[in-house]
Image (cartoon, rainbow, N blue to C red):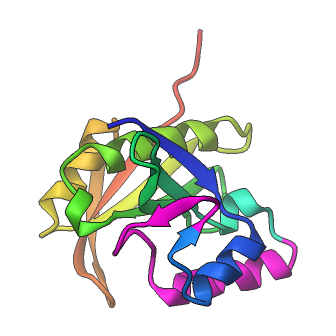
Amino acid sequence: MSISLYLLQIDQLREIDAGVSEVGGFRLEDGALPPSFIINTAIADLESGLAPLWCSFFLFVNEKEGHAVGSGGFRGVPTNGRVEIGYGVAPTQRGKGAATAATLVMVSQAFAHAGVAEVFAETSVDNVPSRRVVEKAGFQHVGRRESQSDGLVDQWLIRRKHRA
């Protein structure tokens, strides 16, 4: 599956929050968007002046079909050289490579910024498909922790490769 990422701007986030079924000419597959609290947080962060790359999110678009199959982005601005990513794909589109392709692009976007040396992710220990996404993208398992919202989660990290 050929996936392109489109960074959403504040006006598009407001449209999504209002319940539209299409943004930027792309039909939104059911389940392709994050929960409304993430959309509202992104809007508030953009209104406060934070850079869109770090506080908005990307639509994962299947160019051939012309629809958004998922979304993801960074969970805030980089701190101490590290930024966290999150992603999700519509249930009908899972297992087709969209999340892995999008994760690779997001990692590349993060490493395009000199201040980012590491990209971090967490996956529920029970979510094997999400675990496979980060493994295929080159992340290394670095630990586990108990999360209030997700229970036990695996922690993953990929570091910028330094050229000699």
Q: Position of residue 112 (x, y in %)?
A: 68, 35
- The C terminus, quarter of image: top right
Q: Nearer the viewer, residue 24 or 119?
A: 24
Q: Position of residue 33 (x, y in %)?
A: 45, 73
Q: Residue at x 30, y 66 (%)?
A: 90
Furthest-top residue in this view? 164
- In which quarter of the view is residue 2 placed? top left
Q: Residue at x 56, y 36 (%)?
A: 108
Find out whether residue 103 is within the magenta segment.
no
Q: Residue at x 53, y 90 (%)?
A: 37
- In which quarter of the view is residue 29 placed? bottom left
Q: Position of residue 6 (x, y in %)?
A: 61, 52
- The N terminus, quarter of image: top left
Residue 17, relative to residue 92: is it above or below?
below
Give left or right: position of 53 versus 111: right
Q: Which residues are magenta?
A: 23-49
